[in-house]
Image (spheres, rainbow, N blue to C red):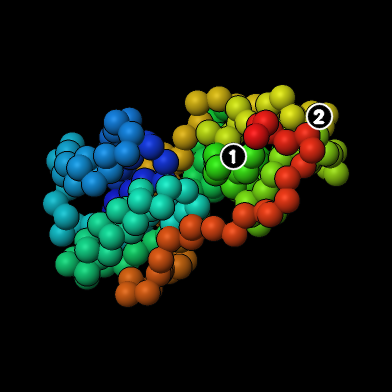
Amino acid sequence: MSLILCIETSTTVCSVAIAKESNCIAFNRSDTGNAHSVVLTPLIEKTLKEASIDPSMLSAVAVSDGPGSYTGLRIGVSVTKGLCYSLNIPAITISSLKIIAANALNKIDPKDKDALICPLMDARRMEVYSALYSINLKEVKKIKAEIIDEKSYSHTNNKIYFAGNGVDKCREVIQSRDVFFLTGIDPLASSMCRLATEKYDNKQFADVAYFEPFYLKNFIATHSKKSILKT
């Protein structure tokens, strides 16, 4: 039986969950903004206590590894490394965009088997971090930073669900057919449980000494004439 502590700090929301054999048995979040350095440790302690789990019982620690907030990611990864070193357990990393996609599944009809999920994370100015996943959370398009314009995603006939805090940037821009914009979808630790358990079962562990967050700093240099925001 695996018990995995899940940590998500890639946005202004800081959250912690406990995965027991892929099921979320305890979850807490803080929406106090950029205060992860203050709230993360108490959140971990509270979540472990609610699940009646001592840290020594943990099988692994899973953390979102980006893209996202530089400071938030650093805090999450630093705490993860500290716990893994002290408890001598493996670390698991999961893309914050895949976590958004996993959360979006709660609002998508499972009968839409050909639908795609496009998590969008607000970057800066007209840019977003994006990716594409199938309804089974298989990667269809790799993570990248891009500028969304009226031609974006017009190449596919699949129904696309957009989710994440970058949705508002794109709602009035994307003109493709069969697109749906899901609101209130954050990357949350509770959505990491199944993903983390799958990686644990497959022994897909990160190198605790060397892994770093995926900041994705390389932005597109040119801007569309019909971009998301006016400069």
Q: Please report the residue visible at 32 percent of the width from the left and 75 percent of the height from the top.
A: 209
Residue matched to label 1: 125
* For residue 91, side relative to residue 50 (left or right): right
* For residue 109, side relative to residue 185 (left or right): right
- Depth check: give the residue in front, 25 or 73: 73
For mark 2, does the 10 Å Cα neighbourhood hold few (<14), some (14 to 19), or many (20 or more) residues? Answer: some
Relative to 199, say whether 206 is above or below: below
- Image quarter (top left, top right, bottom left or bottom right) of the N terminus: bottom left
* Type of amino acid under label 2: Gln
Number of the label disc, if any, that sits on residue 160:
none
- Depth check: give the residue in front, 57 or 188: 188
The image quadrant that residue 33 belongs to is top left
Residue 56, x across and y down, in percent:
15, 59
Q: Can residue 123 be seen from the camera position used here?
A: yes
Residue 133, x across and y down, in percent:
65, 47
Label 1 vs label 2: CA separation? Answer: 20 Å
In this view, the residue farthest toward the front is 231
Per the image, label 1 sits on a secondary structure element best described as: loop
Residue 55, x across and y down, in percent:
16, 55
Relative to 57, say whether 119 is above or below: above
Residue matched to label 2: 175
